[in-house]
Image (tube, rainbow, N blue to C red):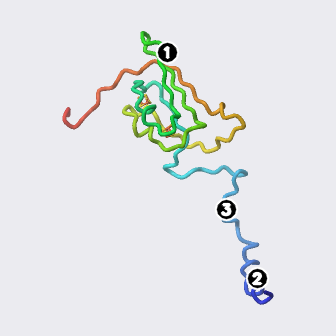
Amino acid sequence: MKLKLAAFLPEIIKHFFKKPATVQYPFQKSYPPEGFRGTPILKSEMCIACKACERDCPAEAIEITTVSAEEKTFRMVIHNDRCIHCGQCVDSCTTDAMYLNMDFELATDDRHNLKAVYDYRRAIPQKKTTAAAL
Ligand code: SF4
Ligand code: SF4
């Protein structure tokens, strides 16, 4: 045992004077890598209330209800306590109304704090520019 420690001693001493290889989080701000899937955010001014995101969400984290059919107003609730950050809602959205931000510090002592509520009027569907139409 003594012999083994002696073999490693120079290496151990060397590391005492080296800068730590680990990130000093939370004392220093840490940034997630590119492509990180954070929290889903709705750009309500682009949402046509087609409900594709609600239909495809595997965690049933999205709930869209009609507030007024006449006024074309809707409420979307994103239950971030259920969200598994898969990004399916972003993929399913045909109008780019949904994106994932880069937040990862989501810890809370009350899961209801994670609920995001959006009240909005349905956007006018934009005509798609297809290759055939050009
Ligand atoms: S990221 Fe995935 S789990 Fe979260 S709301 Fe979107 S589809 Fe649902
Ligand atoms: S966010 Fe996109 S997929 Fe979801 S209801 Fe709005 S337009 Fe449809």
Q: Quadrant of the image for the N terminus?
A: bottom right
Whether residue 43 is situated above or below residue 16 in the rendered picture? above
Crowding near pointer 3: few (<14 within 10 Å), some, many (20+)? few
Q: Is mark 3 within 8 Å of ligand 1?
A: no
Q: Is mark 2 within 8 Å of ligand 1?
A: no
Sequence order check: which comes first, mark 2 or mark 1? 2
For this orientation, the residue located farthest to the right is: 2
Residue 33, numbered label:
none
Q: CA distance from mark 1 to mark 3?
A: 50 Å
Q: In this figure, which residue is indicated by the disc labeled 3? A: 22
Q: Is mark 1 within 8 Å of ligand 2?
A: no
Q: Amino acid at mark 2?
A: Leu
Residue located 70% across and 56% down the image: 24
Q: Are marks 1 and 3 in contact (CB under 8 Å)?
A: no
Residue 9: mark in rendering? 2
Would you call the spot at circle 1 few (<14 residues within 10 Å), some (14-19), or many (20 or more)?
some
Q: Amino acid at mark 3?
A: Thr
Say the numbered circle drawn on residue 67: 1
